[in-house]
Image (cartoon, grey):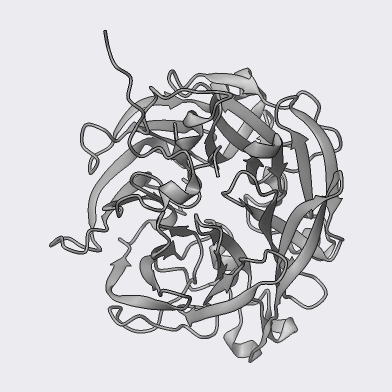
Amino acid sequence: MPTWKPDPTFYPSPRLAATAPAETLAYVASFDPTRKQKDVLAVVDLDASSANYGEIVGRVEMSALGDELHHFGWNACSSCLCPNAPHPHVERRYLVVPGLRSSRIHILDVKPDPKSPKIVKVIEPAELAERAGYSRPHTVHCGPGGIYVTALGNADGKGPGGVFVMDHESFEVLGRWEVDRGPQEFAYDMWWHLGHDTMVTSEWGTPDMFEEGLVPELLLGAKYGRKLHFWDLQKRKHVQEIDFGAQQQLVFELRPAHDPTRAYGFVNCVLSLENLSSSIWTWYRDGNKWAVQKIIEIPAEPADPEQLPPALKDFKACPPLVTDIDLSVDDKYLYVSCWGTGDFLQYDVTDPLRPKQTGKLRIGGIVSRAGHPKAKGPLNGGPQMVELSRDGRRIYFTNSLYGTIDPQFYPEGIKGWMVKIDAKEGGGMALDPEFFVDWPAGHLPHQIRLQGGDASSDSYCYP
């Protein structure tokens, strides 16, 4: 008789996950913004003792043109150890890689050779539309009973967007997740509090609102997403909406506490129409309802209009444009990417309503163009997609946001790169001077996944 053993990269609690061995590879979404070459999943060597440290050591081309690889995830993770949906025999073996523009989903097997993943299944847009009624798949999370994916458009590429579920062994699209979506129309990110039977979703807009770039009239008219939605995870029903207010535009990345006994999380708002600032908000339980509180406001920096792109010249300021955040597995540090100014910030969020800034560094930026010890000359783009190791000591980020939005803020065209930050004991950060991936021309890097799991890949059912 076979003896089932859980995947050794699964951990029942975040405390145990933080003891995991260091990652040696990263998988990085790499897309061609002109859509003339196939997108690539790149494999980067993270082993500091390797002769190829900080180099791309593998790549796999997608099956067709025009995917715009964006956010991707694992077929299975530590949530497989949850008592309400145990699947301990499933392995963290496959990457589920959606094309945000094409609506095509590739399934890649990394087990036979982790440096050379193989495409084992392709789900075409028509199948996704037929089975789930959605398009533009965006965020992938392995969860109890399946793979959950947000989608920004319906089958026709309009609204509403939502969530669909895939089988985590056959990779069949099972169908739409929502039974009752209530007032929810826009979609973006999705995550949950497994200990509180709650799903949370955030908002961007429908595909016509971003595929050709941000639309200034819609942005200044406060037409982009600005709400959080809370759902009953078991009943799959909408229970509450929180509106951040018309001046807050683009409520994006959700980072719930990893400890399943704690009912709070963090979300970034990219832009305030009032003063071009970005902000971080905490959601939390307040009695029998959910509430939010703004905990951090990051101001725009005055700038010479000559150094600003056309979209910003009249404002005479460089907005921080916080486009990604990440929370360490121990729930202690929140990392904040300011894609506009080039700042990368670290906050101690031990008290989730009273953060303390503990670190700051700068690389790239619309105006500053701050460099790197290993790079030749000034850099553009800025800290964007960020990922942390499970022990919280190593942080990696890339510099591209989205193919048609990059040139709105960096009109000269972004040159892709990936860097590594070392977190100091007790707070503070330093750039790793030896790690700088000068991205191959023709493609731009976006989301990073770490081999074996990372700070935004897994959810846990035990504290």
* Residue at the image position 50 percent from the left and 40 percent from the top: 99
**Quarter of the image holding residue 183?**
top right
Q: Position of residue 351 (x, y in %)?
A: 67, 66
Q: Position of residue 209 (x, y in %)?
A: 71, 50
Residue at the outermost left position: 51
Q: Position of residue 373 (x, y in %)?
A: 30, 82
- In the image, 96: left or right of 236? left
Count of numbered circles on the image: 0
Residue 455 appears in view: yes
- In the image, 87: left or right of 125? left
Residue at the outermost bottom position: 304
- In the image, 427: left or right of 212? left
Residue 225 appears in view: no
* Residue at the image position 58 percent from the left and 32 percent from the top: 148
Residue 210 or residue 448, whichever sits in front? 448
- Residue 324, relative to residue 92: is it above or below? below
* Residue at the image position 35 percent from the left and 44 percent from the top: 452
Placement of the C terminus among the 4 image quadrants: top right
Placement of the N terminus among the 4 image quadrants: top left
Residue 166 or residue 276, whichever sits in front? 166
- Residue 352, relative to residue 303: is it above or below? above
Q: Position of residue 225 (x, y in %)?
A: 77, 52
Residue 8 or residue 235, whichever sits in front? 8
